[in-house]
Amino acid sequence: MSTNTSGAGFAIRRNGTCNASLGEVYCGETAKPYHACCPRSAYCPADPPYNAYCCDQPDFNCTMAILDEGPFCANTSWNMYDNGGYFCCDVGMPGYQNTELNSNGCARPGFQLASSETYLTPLGQESKPTASSNTSPSLPLTTTASSQSPASSSSPTSGSNSPNVGAIAGGTVGGLAVLALIIIILWCAFLRRRNHRQTDLHPADLHLFQSPEKVQGRGVAVEMETTIVPSELPGDRPTTISGLPPVTQ
């Protein structure tokens, strides 16, 4: 099914003939004196129904595509109306219905409504799709889309070669964070090593901060003074000196 509705949509009602200056395509008579017309390059259905529609391919029923994606007029500058089926009128030519004849049309300026005729309210239209796709390779529209595919595919290719600013910025920030972490680790290792070196250079000073130890369980050992106080020998008895004979009094 075609989804390219650039030329598809519901036909316009013309009182008389189609607009030749616009290159409109004649699609047959509806309710007298009106005729269905489609835009240039559009195609009419093989058997124009009462509520005629325009297709973008010849001999193709695009009604379902128009209803699924729309509804909308073949030319979105037209006004769309619903009277048991959609039809379109030029701006300034309001649509109306005839309940007696069960028909509709577009009123020209100064048109006088009959007792069985009433004006209709314009409907909002959906936006037309711009992409095209078709499962049938034999249709000319598909061939056109295929021939244009290299040009359309060139844009993503050129876009993929452009630098990704977000990725570059993220990589730069991540690199700076890793560098800062390495500097912090090296600085901590340097401080720790310096502290160890200071401790190794003064091992002899460690005993100054050690508490006194007990000596053989008898109390706290303290350092004795090196000064020896000599004591006098008693004078009331002789003293033997090694290596000499005793002296007789």
Image: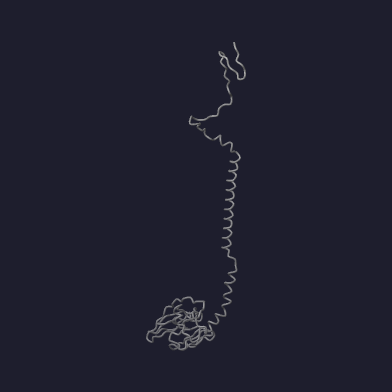
Most distant residue in the front direction = 245
Quadrant of the rendering where the C terminus is positioned = top right
Q: Out of 19 and 219, give the one closest to the viewer.
A: 219
- Position in image of residue 75 (x %, y %): 50, 80
Above-or-below relation of 25 to 70? below
Horizontal arrangement in the rendering, residue 111 relative to residue 237 (left or right):
left
What residue is drawn where x is 41% and y is 82%?
Answer: 85
Most distant residue in the top direction = 249
Most distant residue in the right direction = 244
Q: Out of 120 and 41, give the one closest to the viewer.
A: 41
- Position in image of residue 184 (x %, y %): 57, 50
| Type of colouring | one colour
Above-or-below relation of 233 to 38? above
What residue is drawn where x is 59% and y is 41%?
Answer: 200
What residue is drawn where x is 58% and y is 60%?
Answer: 171
Q: Out of 100 and 131, give the one closest to the viewer.
A: 131
Q: How many marks?
A: 0
- Position in image of residue 98 (x %, y %): 39, 84
- Position in image of residue 220 (x %, y %): 50, 30
Q: Out of 180 and 112, give the one closest to the viewer.
A: 180
